[in-house]
Image (tube, rainbow, N blue to C red):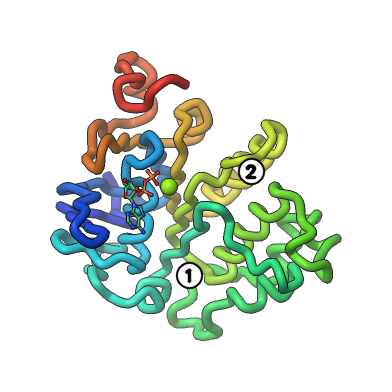
Amino acid sequence: MANSALVLSGIDAYYGDSHVLQKVSFELGEGRLLGLLGRNGAGKSTCMNVSVGLLPPRAGVVEVFGTPVTRLPPEQIAARGVALVPQGRRVFKSLTVRENLIVAARDKDAATRHANWNAATVFAMFPRLAERANQLSAHLSGGEQQMLAIGRALMANPRVLLMDEPSEGLAPQIVAEVMTTIRKLKESGLSIVLVEQSPKLVFDIADDIVILNSGRVAVVSTAAALKNDGVDLRQHLGVF
Ligand SMILES: Nc1ncnc2c1ncn2[C@@H]1O[C@H](COP(=O)(O)OP(=O)(O)O)[C@@H](O)[C@H]1O
Ligand SMILES: [Mg+2]
């Protein structure tokens, strides 16, 4: 694989005494899209929280473009160019769309800026958000809130984008729009981890697939190889 954008290596993570990630290792190559799959409770969001510094691991190493960031505070990991679109969107409902974007802008320092997103370019990507720029985010539809959550992450000008179940709770047509957006972001050169429960959404868009099962990595493969060998994914993912 070419350069690694994000590496998790031998990660052990706990919530209190509960050992949630056990020796989890995987690697996101630069410019690639990694689909991180697993049943509810498998540890996907915990991997995202570890990657952005919200949950320091007890063991193991996180690297961003070859530099260890393990146990750095979230702000410093963000400065290395990692942004998370959190599960459940978590936009500020009491702020307008534009305010949500502005408060998410991370820095004006060109030295640690990995892209050139601003409110105007986010609005150009999501015209529906532009139309609603001055509305309270509480009044957005689920799909619009997801677009805003993605826009907020882009405002940090990342080079690694982590998206935690962006399709959750959205109608199929809106899911398709979100997937189109993700494809565009990949084409723009971002390295992306796309967390989903459903392999159907991920297989067509991902280069690489990692499947978690009960806090452990069960499968690491390219998407193409997995499609061909017909591994029994039900074993790890349940019915889909
Ligand atoms: N804040 C928390 N405190 C305690 N346990 C948690 C917390 N968040 C998640 N867990 C537990 O950790 C495990 C992994 O959760 P999570 O990473 O959210 O899984 P996924 O995102 O794959 O659904 C689950 O058993 C879940 O119940
Ligand atoms: Mg989750």
Where is residue 111? Give x, y as percent.
Answer: 44, 82
> Of tags 2 and 1, which is closer to the observer?
2
Where is residue 174? Give x, y as percent.
Answer: 70, 39
Q: Residue at x 34, y 57 (%)?
A: 5
203 vs 173, left or right, is left
The residue indicated by pointer 2 is 178
Q: Residue at x 63, y 62 (%)?
A: 151
Q: Quadrant of residue 119?
A: bottom right
Kindly identify the amino acid type of the residue bearing the numbered disc 2.
Val
Q: Quadrant of residue 89?
A: bottom right
Residue 148 or 186: which is nearer the viewer?
148
Give the class, few, some or many, for how many residues have Cα within 10 Å of label 1's Cα (few <14, many ≥20).
some
113 vs 229, left or right, is right
Where is residue 182? Give x, y as percent.
Answer: 57, 46
Placement of 96 over or under 174, stated as above or below: below
Q: Secondary structure at mark 2?
A: helix
The residue indicated by pointer 1 is 114
Residue 168 or 72: which is nearer the viewer?
168
Q: Residue at x 55, y 64 (%)?
A: 153
167 vs 231, left or right, is right
Kindly identify the amino acid type of the residue bearing the numbered disc 1.
His
Q: Secondary structure at mark 1?
A: loop
**Residue farthest to the right?**
131
50 vs 138, left or right, is left
